Image: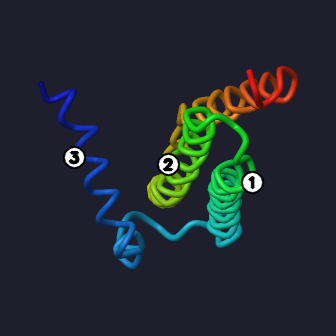
Amino acid sequence: MTGKVAPVIDFARNVRLWFSPAEVRDDGETPDYRFSLANERTFLAWLRTALALIGGGFAVDQFLPDLPWGWRVGLALALLAAGALCALRAVNHWVRCERAMRRGEDLPVSRFPALLGVVVAGVAVVMVVVVLVGWEA
């Protein structure tokens, strides 16, 4: 049971640290500032990706009115959800990386990039089918 509870406790602690970054500084030693800045640039890149996904979701909903309602809403919601998850993941990953650097630990790994890639590829395949088959099908 402890093995299943520990990740939940770590995640809850990380969420708390999202809103108090000064607490992250209390953990371990200050890393070379270049690593912290690189971590921040990665965070900002994930936020740009999230904004692009959210914009794509709105674009599908607003600019494809001839697409059947279920397809349009499904594609839009998939992109919007991916964008929201991407933004949340960006903050969580920033905190986890910053803590790992301060502690001298390996940087955390994540399956999220693979999941995001699969979702975006799935939406792209559906859109290719829609374009090839046409709106009426």
Q: Quadrant of the N terminus?
A: top left
Q: Residues within 10 Å of mark 2 (few under 14, many from 20)?
A: some
Q: Name the residue that disc number 1 marks.
A: 63
Q: Name the residue that disc number 2 marks.
A: 85
Q: Name the residue located 67 percent from the left edge and 26 percent from the top edge.
A: 122
Q: Nearer the viewer, mark 3 or mark 2?
A: 2
Indicate the amino acid at tag 1: Phe
Residue 116 occupies which quadrant of the picture?
top right
Q: Position of residue 4 (x, y in %)?
A: 21, 28
Horizontal side of residue 62 vs 93, given as left or right = right
Is residue 132 placed above or below 123 in the rendered structure? above
Indicate the amino acid at tag 3: Ile
Is residue 118 placed above or below 96 in the rendered structure? above
Q: Secondary structure at mark 2?
A: helix
How many angstroms separate mark 3 from mark 2 (CA)?
20 Å
Q: Name the residue located 73 percent from the left edge and 42 percent from the top edge.
A: 66
Are discs 3 and 1 less than 8 Å apart at CB? no
Toward the right, the furthest residue is 132
How many angstroms separate mark 2 from mark 1 (CA)?
23 Å
Residue 6 occupies which quadrant of the picture?
top left
Residue 74 occupies which quadrant of the picture?
top right
Of marks 2 and 1, which one's residue comes earlier in the chain? 1
Q: Residues within 10 Å of mark 3 (few under 14, many from 20)?
A: few
Q: Name the residue that disc number 3 marks.
A: 9
- Number of marks present in the image shown: 3
Horizontal side of residue 23 vs 59, given as left or right = left
Is residue 137 placed above or below 102 in the rendered structure? above
Q: Name the residue located 65 percent from the left edge and 72 percent from the top edge.
A: 33
Q: Secondary structure at mark 3?
A: helix
Of marks 3 and 2, which one's residue comes earlier in the chain? 3
Q: Position of residue 106 (x, y in %)?
A: 53, 42
Q: Nearer the viewer, mark 2 or mark 1?
A: 1
